[in-house]
Image: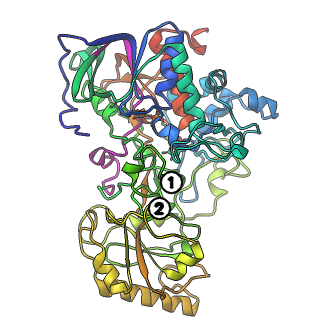
Amino acid sequence: MDLKGQNVAPHPPARWDLEADVVVIGAGATGLPAAIVAREAGSSVILVEAEADIGGHAITSGGNVPLGGGTSVQRQYGIEDSPDLLFRDLTDWSVVGPNGFPDYRFNDREIIRAFADHSAAAFEWLLAHGVIFVDKAPDAFGGNSVGNSVPREMHCAVMDWPTVQTGKPADPAVQKTRSSGNGLMRPLEVAARKAGVETLLEHRMTRIYRQTPTSGPVLGIAVHHKGANLNIRARKAVIIGTGGSTGNVNFRRMFDPRLTHEYCGLAGMPWYDQDASGELAAMSIGASLWGLFNQTGEFGSALTKPGSIGCQYNYRNLQWMPRSRVFERARASGLKVADWQDVILVNMLGRRFYDETGGQFISNNYNSVDPYVQGSYLNAKNFKYSPNNFLNAALAGIDDGHNGGGPIWAIFDSDAIAREGWEPNPPNVDIAAGFFFAANRLSDLAEKIVMQHQRVPMPPANLEETVARYNSFVDSGVDEDFGKPRPMYRIANPPFYAAWATPVVHDTRAGLRINARCQVIDMTGEIIPGLYCGGESAGGFSQHGLARAACQGYIAGHAAAGAPLLDDAG
Ligand SMILES: Cc1cc2nc3c(=O)[nH]c(=O)nc-3n(C[C@H](O)[C@H](O)[C@H](O)COP(=O)(O)OP(=O)(O)OC[C@H]3O[C@@H](n4cnc5c(N)ncnc54)[C@H](O)[C@@H]3O)c2cc1C
């Protein structure tokens, strides 16, 4: 999408094409709940969605939802949780990962308090709006930065909705036990229709209008639809639920200059691109960003190791299959790696850079610190220090003064193919766009690696030397360069392969400044009247995903429609 000029405040239009009380941007985990809540509170609602289908990253997700604070299911299983316990968990300064990075220290207390107070209500609201959760006790699986004290993770049953990844329903045997974002978003789509939300697909918001560029209330938005521009007036409020910024290279590099364009395999893409359009449109009318450390902190899933190789979209928990609606954009499913012992990973110059079995950053969940006492200095001491530096080594680059680590290639031979049971042909691998190469000699393989992100040729002698040295480590049983554990395997049996294995950018954990009611705040600390935001486009809350998005959508929908929230009672 061309975002040029999006940071320039537009003048309100002379004519409105459509209007509603509340206009919601983005039909994802924030936008759909916000739209339904506002409509059920009596407001007319227009929900605009850029893509041809609803769902956002939420529909591609694992459907693991850490809403807690005393839900009916927590009570059913005898788990004692409360808004206060949840609040203290998510603001605990003393929790750090093994690499010393804190999950919660930089969370905004006002925003977390609102989440803690409305978390259980948002969960019950999802139940009441058709979401079916897997029938088991809350656990610690699938979320991250969700608090240490008690299990809070619930899982949306996939049921018989065709999944967006495969284009077909899951096996009936697992429909009630497998967790998936389809099981969250399809019921909400039905609920939105039932409530009378007017959903406009393929309507991409391009501008937010305010009375004057930096003062007065928000008046509406501009959208682009099939070559035409329309203006939609919002009588009461506009809610931003556009899902974050990691797909916008210039925007994400404000947080981390290393994240240059080769990090192109974003999680959740190509279902939709997190292009920062919500943030940019709000910033152009004065909005502030917030909680920026949470984006660069080395915990959780902002950056991940790939799970599949040989394709562009290689997030470890998401493989696009040929019957998916977006397979034409994804082009290949990738080869899922069961054991990183089966490959070596090299940089653009054909050099190894780390133990290939190394992991990514981790985050705090139930029982990660054990024993755990909220706020105790001992929590940080209960971890054995481990730098978790695989990703940093991959992003370190080739010492030529450029930012970004460049492509990372998995190099392997036909024995590895047999061990992994891979089928190294399309549609599993993307040969046409240059994400997979094969050759009978290592030197030929290095020469073949030509693609848009490989900005220097890989010297054939380097790759031969790297493999020969690695094979000598296999023979001696000791990886003298990176301490990779055994068993290692020789790379010797042609054909040889090079498969794209570059790290993946995933979550946005920093965005627009909001208050407890999800109202967007400007650079002078004032509320921008009529503008709300939640989910990955909002800042101040370090937590992976669905729970904060759904809960903030729930809060924003109430507040935008002028409906009472829990804390209004007192
Ligand atoms: C593969 C994967 C697995 C995940 N698994 C989990 C999990 O198990 N548990 C968990 O808690 N989190 C998970 N997450 C994260 C979670 O899905 C997201 O954090 C959550 O969906 C964010 O909600 P959101 O409303 O901010 O954005 P989204 O749900 O992504 O929705 C944003 C919507 O806005 C639309 N949009 C964007 N720009 C515009 C525009 N200019 N005009 C109109 N519409 C626009 C998009 O098309 C999209 O539909 C996962 C994410 C991925 C990618």
Question: Is 251 one of the magenta-colored residues?
Answer: yes
Question: What's the amino acid at mark 2?
Answer: Gly
78 vs 462, left or right, is right
* Label disc, if present, on residue 334 of the rendered structure: 2
Locate the N terminus by quadrant. Answer: top left
- Whether tag 1 and tag 2 are in contact, CB under 8 A, the answer is yes
Q: Amino acid at mark 1?
A: Gln
Mark 2 secondary-structure assignment: loop
Pointer 1 residue: 319
Above or below for 248 versus 479: above
Name the image quarter holding residue 477.
bottom right
Residue 373 seen by the camera: no
Q: Is residue 319 left or right of residue 128?
A: left
Position above or below: 27 against 291? above
Badge 1 or badge 2: first in the primary sequence: 1
Query: Residue visible at 45% across and 86% down?
Result: 494
> How many numbered discs, if any?
2
Residue 39 in the image, given as x and y percentages of width and height: 49, 12
